[in-house]
Image (cartoon, grey):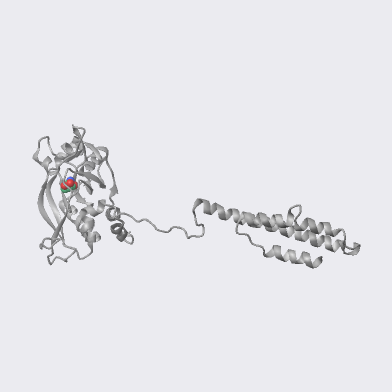
Amino acid sequence: MKNKIEKFIAEVQSFEANSLEQLEAFRIKFLSKKGLVPLLFADFKQVAAEDRKAMGQLINSLKNAIQEKIVSLKQQLENQSDSEVSGMDLSLPANSAMGSRHPLSIVRNEIIDIFSRIGFNVSEGPEIEDDFHNFTALNFPPDHPARDMQDTFFIEKDPDIALRTHTSSVQVRVMENGEPPIRTISPGRVFRNEAISARAHCIFHQVEGLYIDTDVSFSDLKHTLFYFAKEMFGEETKTRFRPSYFPFTEPSAEMDISCNICGGKGCNICKYTGWVEILGCGMVDPNVLDTCNIDSKKYTGFAFGMGIERITMLKYQINDLRLFFENDLRFLKQFEAAE
Ligand code: DAH
């Protein structure tokens, strides 16, 4: 009998079950009314008195081994079926595919960073603007032909409310609500009723800059923008100013940088001139200061505005502006390392 019990104990210890049904069969084999353990207890009556204690202990340890086995296998099988039911493989490593910042956000952050190093803060304004902030306060009188420079989306046929066509509208709000010294840049989304092409979109992004204080001069403007161009495009970058026209600045200029693709030698990006335009700028027109409650006899200022798409295209040599809006992961993934 002793041998028999020890053989059962070994069998129990090595038992494995693949299903709850197999485990139940195991339980029945040993513990049911007519199972092996009750049979052993029946045989126990015939055991000699001096062997009874040891034999009793042995049967009990068999019974305990069976019960422990049932509990642990049951738990194991139930855990398995949980993960099968939910369709999850809990042994797979965690999904580590990280997203990355959009190239326009990377460049916007870099522009903010460059200007914040020389004391500019960041200000924002609404994307839905009234005529006063987008045009009139910036010296575009009603019916002024300069309004045609920016094809405008109006809201529900109300000629007073439009999607802002440039971030210069934020200049007006900052001047209305603050006092010089003002040193701020305003990044944001702007909207124009233009056909979508490799070079233009009806939604794009700009950064506006504004500096107002006593004695701000055109040389301050130039020096600030030289610094910006070198920080953004590299120390060797050359800059040049060309006279231009904007209603809200006088004098006005556009700034070119030496083409960072061919290094100024001439290529199709710079149309073989060696130069590419990156922004508009000028001294804030005294009319604009006065309209925004800033005393133009006491203060002067400069402003500039640039398109973030354009800066990004030049910086990363991207030749089609539509790529920024298509969410093609093959394009976006190329900027993973650029942050
Ligand atoms: N608002 C102009 C545009 O969207 C860009 C610009 C030009 C902004 C000259 C300025 C500036 O602040 O001084 O075309």
Which residue is drawn at the image coordinates 49% and 54% (left, top)?
Answer: 88
* Quadrant placement of the N terminus: bottom right
Q: Residue furthest top?
A: 158
- Taking the image as shown, residue 281 lies to the left or right of residue 69, namely left
Residue 49 location, quadrant: bottom right
- At which x and y percent is residue 17? 63, 59
196 relative to 54, above or below: above
- At which x and y percent is residue 127? 25, 40
Q: Please name whichever residue, 161 or 281, is drawn nearer the observer in this view of the structure.
A: 161
Q: Please name whichever residue, 268 or 252, is drawn nearer the observer in this view of the structure.
A: 268
Q: Residue furthest right?
A: 49
- At which x and y percent is residue 114? 27, 56
Q: Residue furthest front?
A: 34
Which residue is drawn at the image coordinates 33% and 55% (left, top)?
Answer: 101
267 relative to 306, above or below: below
* Quadrant placement of the C terminus: bottom left
Which residue is drawn at the image coordinates 16% and 38% (left, top)?
Answer: 135
Please indicate, yes or no, whether residue 295 appears anywhere in the rendered image. no
- At which x and y percent is residue 221? 18, 52
182 relative to 331, above or below: above
Please indicate, yes or no, whether residue 337 appears anywhere in the rendered image. yes
- Taking the image as shown, residue 267 lies to the left or right of residue 130, namely left
